[in-house]
Structure formats: structure tokens, C-alpha cells
Amino acid sequence: MVAVQAHRGSPDLVTGVRENTLEAFARARALGAGGVELDVRVTADGGLAVHHDPVVEGYGPVHRLATTALPPHVPMLADALDVCNGMVVNVEIKNLPTEQAFDPSERCAADVVAAVVEAGATDSVLVSSFWSGALGAVRATGSGIPTGLLVLPSYDLADAVAAALDLGCAAVHLPVPMVTAAAVSSVHAAGLQVAVWTVADQDTLDVVLATGVDTVITDDVAMARRTLDRP
């Protein structure tokens, strides 16, 4: 059974539902997603803001904003976990050395784990990141929360699998261009699962499903559900 995760929830421009909002996560549930993918950044006062980009448009960089200075549509992780109760939540930690806000102490990872534990959600959360330091920090907490290594199209698959195994990951999250039957088979042979990002159309969905992936991270939950629910 292939799992469906809603990429940044299920935003809807027509009705004004923004990505990475409580409304988007609730909409994903209503559309039949088994899980959501969301992004977390640390605010100036240590809050865990659910936001993809380093900057909140019209407000400033997340890491320079106090929690109270965030716009109403940017939720905290604890609230997102509450709205997503009963769903799988793929928490992507945003803490890259290439960004101005990079924190080598990996505070975000430790605080995400603490929030997940407090929410009683350790069995329904997976933490993902492009940055190995964040995943290593999650593992170091001893929480047992599974992790997934996000992979860029420029990565070598064998190197990515080796890195994921070294980090104790449960999965690799491959971009659509890297997903082939051979690639998925090699990842499975290493004992890891495969999530694919980001599936936006029917043709792409059909191709990746044929390779045997475990999870589809999609911008169109309704499409994925229609396809997977066919008799």
C-alpha cells in the first residue's frame, strides 16, 4: 500500500488556503491524505515556525522574528501536530549551512524532537532533512523517531544510500528524476524505504507508482487518492 503525503499540506489558491498552514493540513485530511509534509524553522525566540522559505514575505527572515511577530497564517509546530493528529507527519528541518540562519548547534532538531515527544506523536512523525547534521542530531536524542534523508537530483544514489544508512535513517526521499525501478530496488535492498517528491501530475504519478515506491509526496492529493483507490 503506497502512502500519500500532502506536500506542505493541500493549499488551494482559489479559496485562499496557503501552504504550510493549519487550513492546508486540515484540507489534506479531508482529501484523503494519510500524512502531510511540512517545514520547520526556528524563530528569534526559539519558536518552531512551520514555514518553507527563510523569509516570511512582508515580515522578514524567520530567524529574526519573534513568534509573536509572525503573521497569523504561520503556525507553530505544536499546533500543526495537533491538527494532524492521527496522520503521519513528515517534518522537514530547515537548517542548512548555505543559509544565513544556519545553527551548527542543531537546536531545531532537538526542539522538534522535544515537541514531538510532548505531543505524544513519536509513532506518527518522521523527520527529514537535506542536512545530515540535523538527522544525526535527531538520532542522538535517542527518541527513536525515524528519519529520512532528502536527496537532490545531483546526488549519487549509492552515496545517498550509504549516507542514509550511516545516519540510521529509515528512508531516502528521492526527487522524481531519480526514481526508477532499478533505483527503488537498490534502496529497498539496503533496507530503506523510498519516498518520492514532488508528484504534481497524473503522468508522473503513474511512472513513480510503477517503480514500487513506498510513499508519494504530492501537490495533488485528490489525484493520488483517485489513482490508488481504483478497484
Image: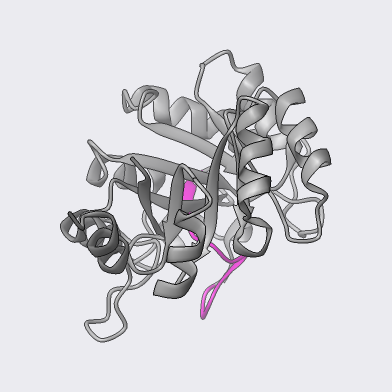
Residue drawn at x 63%, y 52% is: 174
- Indicate left or right for 206 with 197 as reference: left
Query: Residue 222 lies in what quarter of the image?
Result: bottom left
* Residue 147 against residue 149 in the figure, above or below: above
* Residue 121 against residue 185 in the figure, above or below: above
Most foreground residue, 3 or 29? 3
Location of the N terminus by quadrant is top left
Residue drawn at x 83%, y 49% is: 156
Residue 192 appears in the picture as rendered: yes
* Residue 116 against residue 131 in the figure, above or below: above
- At which x and y percent is residue 134? 68, 36
Most foreground residue, 41 or 67? 41
User: Magenta includes 176?
Assistant: no
- At which x and y percent is residue 57? 53, 78
Residue drawn at x 49%, y 60% is: 51
* Residue 231 against residue 135 in the figure, above or below: below
Start and end of the magenta stretch?
47-59
- At which x and y percent is residue 111? 53, 32
Location of the C terminus by quadrant is bottom left
